[in-house]
Image (cartoon, rainbow, N blue to C red):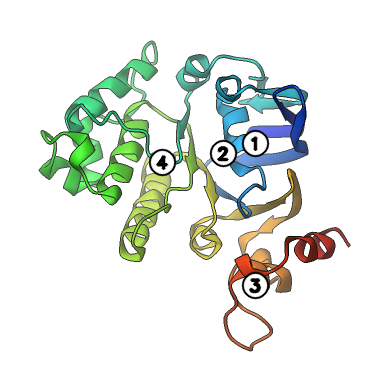
Amino acid sequence: MNALLELNNVEVVYNHAVLVLKGLSLRVPEGEIVALLGTNGAGKSTTMKAISGLLPLEDGEVTDGDIRYQGASIRGRLPHEIARLGLVQVLEGRRIFEDLTVEENLAVARYARRGRPGAGLEPEAVYAYFPRLQERRRQTAGYLSGGEQQMLAIGRALVAGPRLLLLDEPSLGLAPLLVDEIFEILVRINREEGVTMLLVEQNAAMALQIASFGYIMEGGRVVLEGPRDVLVRDRDVQEFYLGVRGGHGAVNYREVKHYKRRKRWLS
């Protein structure tokens, strides 16, 4: 399939000293949902910020490699320029405008699609995916529940007119039933609106339910990649990310020593 987004041997350095991404390469085919998995500190969020142009806000810089969107390099472009190309990020922690109402949050998102007629969903279409937002459309966003705020963050991104949606930990801090609901809606958006998605998640089981392809990161590198069906059958993925160990019950991958996981990936 044609790649909508490609990262080729990307290196990222923070504060001119700390190498975080170490030759990262990945591709996101148009129309697909691709999962980027890994534990805390693997470099997932840094990857997203490198794509969306937000690294300079944290003293980060892409020092090598290239990032190509729709075949053209976007390395070094400003965040608002990248957003207007149709590459929109839903940041970890929601980052909504807490002092504005739900409908005002959605109205602000129209700014990102200026000059792109027909791009993006109108608020009424967003409410069709997230009926709770319609019920609370005049409520101040800071008073919404965590799940409702995540819905608003995704809805605001849809209004901005994404061709590629970057989702950074959409399940973070949410109850399992809400996670199920939001992921089901993401699948609908992908199918009905044709929005391509790159999904960063620690909840590997949920991410691999909806993604067609996955990458697993450790220490700033991709250590394993493949179609979803291949990854879910991989013994290491089962043990370290899906909580299954040799048919003997569940294991919390956070309890596994990092060096052991690294040694096996790289052997």
Where is residue 176 shown, x and y percent of the image?
36, 65
Q: Nearer the viewer, mark 1 or mark 3?
A: 3
Which numbered disc flags the more N-terminal residue, 4 or 3? 4
Q: Which residue is labeled 3 in the image?
A: 238
Q: Position of residue 89 (x, y in %)?
A: 47, 32
**Quick one: quadrant of the N terminus?**
top right
**In the structure shown, which secondary structural element does the residue marked by tag 2 occupy?**
loop
**Which residue reaches farthest bottom?**
248
Mark 1 vs 2: CB contact within 8 A? yes
Q: CA distance from mark 4 to mark 2?
A: 26 Å
Query: Callout 1, which amino acid?
Result: Ala
* Closer to us: 6 or 58: 58
Left of 142 or right of it: where is 10? right
Residue 93 appearing in the image: yes
Kind of residue indicated by mark 4: Gly
- Position above or below: 80 against 34: above
Residue for badge 2: 30
Query: What is the quadrant of residue 214 in the picture?
Result: bottom right
- Label 1 and label 3: CA atoms lie apart by 28 Å
The amino acid beneath tag 3 is Gln
- Which residue lies under the disc numbered 1? 3
For disc 2, the neighbor class at 10 Å (few under 14, some 14 to 19, many from 20) is: some
The mark closer to the camera, 4 or 3, is 4
Q: Which type of secondary structure does the marked residue at label 3 adopt?
A: helix
Determine the CA span between mark 2 and mark 3.
28 Å
The residue wearing badge 4 is: 93
